[in-house]
Amino acid sequence: MNIVKITNGKVELRRDSGSLIRVIESSGAIDADINSSGSLILVTKANGKVELRKESGSLIRTIISSNAKSAKFSGEDILVNLNNGKLELRKESGSLVRTL
């Protein structure tokens, strides 16, 4: 299983032994999460944007364009923690399911 590590705003994909596989995002990242199968990565940027990326690093889509503090996978869905304290449950497509 691979892991993600943030170093100086870069998201690094690493093997569980710690060796670097590739750099996913090169600037502005404050949080990252990988799904259970290891095929998708969520990157939260300093400007509040949440991006869904493939393991290769290519962008699939932007989940939310501003105001996000962090994002985590919850099964097939995505939990986005907003700066105002609210929590949004979103599908992988980015559509809002509910606000908690």
Image (spheres, rainbow, N blue to C red):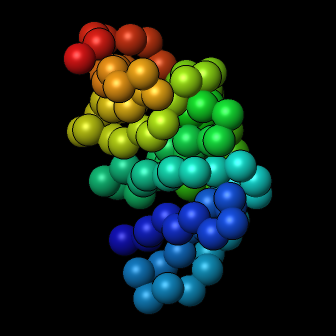
Residue pictured at 48% horizontal, 19% vertical? 94
Judge left or right: residue 28 versus residue 42: right
**Residue 34 placed where, x, y %?**
42, 53
Q: Does the rendering let one see residue 92?
A: no
Q: Is residue 87 above or below residue 5?
A: above
- Name the residue located 43 percent from the left edge and 12 percent from the top edge: 95
Residue 96 sits in which quadrant? top left
Where residue 11 sits: x, y (%)?
62, 60
Q: Residue at x 71, y 49 (%)?
A: 28
On the rendered image, what quadrant is the C terminus found in? top left
Q: Tell whether 63 sits left or right of 90.
A: right
Dividing the image into 4 quarters, which one contains the N terminus? Answer: bottom left
Given residues 81 and 60, the one toward you in this image is 81
**Tally of numbered discs:** 0
At horizontal 38% and vertical 31% (from top left) the residue drawn is 81
Residue 76 point in image, percent of width and height? 29, 34
- The location of residue 93, given as percent across then percent down, is 47, 20
Kindly give the residue lying farthest to the front in the view shown: 84
Q: Indicate whether 37 appears above or below 45.
A: below
Residue 67 quadrant: top right
> Quick check: 71 above or below 83?
below
- Residue lying at the far right of the rendered structure: 26
Direction from residue 57 to residue 83 in the image, left or right: left
Residue 17 in sight: yes
Is 79 drawn above or below residue 21 in the view shown? Answer: above
